[in-house]
Amino acid sequence: MSTVSGTASASTSVAQVQAETQSALQEAAQSIISGATGNSSLDVSSLVTALVASKTAGTEAALTTEATNDNTQISALGKLSAALSALQVDLAPLYGGGLLTAFTATATGGTGLTATAGAGAVASTYSVDVSQIATAQSVTSKAFNTTDAGALGTGTLTVGVGSNSMTINVTSSNDTLSDIASAINTANNNPGISASVITGSDGTHLVLNSKSTGAASTINVTVSNAASSTSPLNSLGVTTTAASDSTAGSTSTISTGNGWTQSAYAQDAEFTINGTAATSSTNTVTTALTGVTLNLTADAIDSTGSKPQTLTVAADTTTQATDIENFVSEYNSVVSTIASLTAFDSTQSAGSQGGPLLGDTTTNIIQNALGNIVSSSVTSGGVSATLADVGISLNADGTLTLDTSTLTTALQNDPNQVSTLFNLTNGVGAQLNNSINTFASTGGILDQRTAVYSADLTNVKTQATALTAYSSQLTTQYTNEFTALDSLMATTENDTQYLTQLFGGANSAGALASGKS
């Protein structure tokens, strides 16, 4: 287990602390002996420090070692989890379908037509002929003189685009063309229309522009409750009608005018694909070809109907190869991370030779699980495939090597085999993703292991706090006791010296004996 080297190091550390504490105690004992024999006073500070250390140093060293081991394990598990998560990101195209839905769509033989292709697309060639593109309607009112433009009169305007509309109440305080344009533009329920005022040599005009393209997005304005039948406000009423057929050149028309004109028509895009007619209300066409989006501009219009463009949809082997290369690279990063965390270096000192996850059961399980997946075949729809079939070989150290030439050939000439290998059910990507979820997801095995070490680290900190309090209490207690002892010993020494002076000692006569008292 990864804790073997940590345990050895901890034992060494604790033993060293105990030896140092024993030496300090011996020095403290000598201080007491010296004080008792009158050779010196007690070294209270050193004595207290040594005694407190004898009570707490071993536990403190053990807690420090345990905390270091917890932090080391948390860091190591974090590195492993991060490596697996990074691999999972690069696996996304392989298990999420992106690899198998990578297509290119290229238009040739003209301009103004581009396309993209994705899920559902079929590799093929299509003839696309565009006769008109979708446009948004723009209508301009008749010219109003200065007087009328500044006082159109009161009433109600209902302004609509297609099936959506809004209502504006016109009063004497907002009955200018500019007021009405502002009311349209700032309305919360604006149906998709912008308004502006243009002043020309003939007078002032209200211009309305639909924000949506397509034949159905026609502009209509209804005037009601006008102050009188001759009120200038009545001239803002307009009814436009969508084109009644889908022939090229058919446009929206103004059926009730009051002098309104069109500068841009409400019309659909019209085109054929392999001779089949189709329309779209926008120039971003997503419904004509499954999985393909067509983008049309005016340059794509074939006014003669005799110059269709060719659209080629093909598998995007360049993107597919890049996705597979990224997978191989990130898989090798995981293998390298595991190798680093489980390495054994005999040149290091005892207790520091093994990586933090050397012998770790969970790491071994992860390593074996990933290795089994990349070394096994995949069967789908009666077809079997291995990574070797697309140029990926497994090395003795667990890393993968990619032969780009073999991969390119497989992508171009045997797409069914690639589809089998990376199918969304039991393909290599799907299996690796499921395995990584088990180990590295929130609440997964690595997360649980990390939580255990984190909980132990919290417990160690709690014990360390208690030990600090205990050490402080002992320091106070011992300081008081040995300070008192030192004072007592000093008093005893003074008494001894007085008696010796009075009665004499082994080698001298006292004051009483010599008659000097």
Image: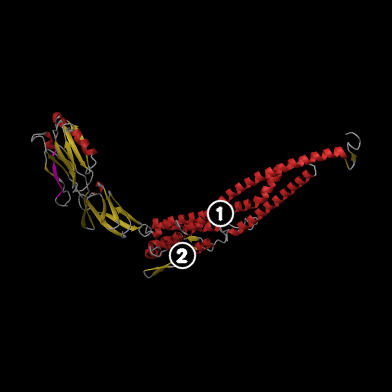
Q: In the image, residue 442 lies at what x, y percent?
A: 45, 56
Q: Which residue is located at x 35 percent, y 58 percent? A: 101
Depth check: give the residue in front, 126 or 168.
168
Q: Which residue is mark 2?
A: 373
Vertical placement of residue 2 versus 160, above or below: below
Residue 324: image quadrant is: bottom left
Depth check: give the residue in front, 340 or 114.
340
Q: Secondary structure at mark 1?
A: helix
Spatial CA span between label 1 and label 2: 32 Å
The single residue placed furthest to the left in the displayed view is 229
Vertical placement of residue 253 versus 173, above or below: below
Q: Residues in magenta?
A: 236-243
Dot label at residue 70: 1
Residue 197: image quadrant is: top left
Left or right of residue 240, residue 488 in this image: right
- State whether residue 222 appears in this view: yes
Q: Which residue is located at x 38 percent, y 61 percent? A: 412
Q: Is 25 contained in the magenta span? A: no
Q: How many marks?
A: 2
Badge nearest the viewer, 1 or 2: 1
- State whether residue 307 appears in this view: no
Q: In the image, residue 341 lies at what x, y percent?
A: 55, 57
Q: In the image, residue 115 lies at what x, y percent?
A: 30, 52
Q: Secondary structure at mark 2?
A: helix
Do the CB atoms of the residues marked 1 and 2 lie less than 8 Å apart? Answer: no
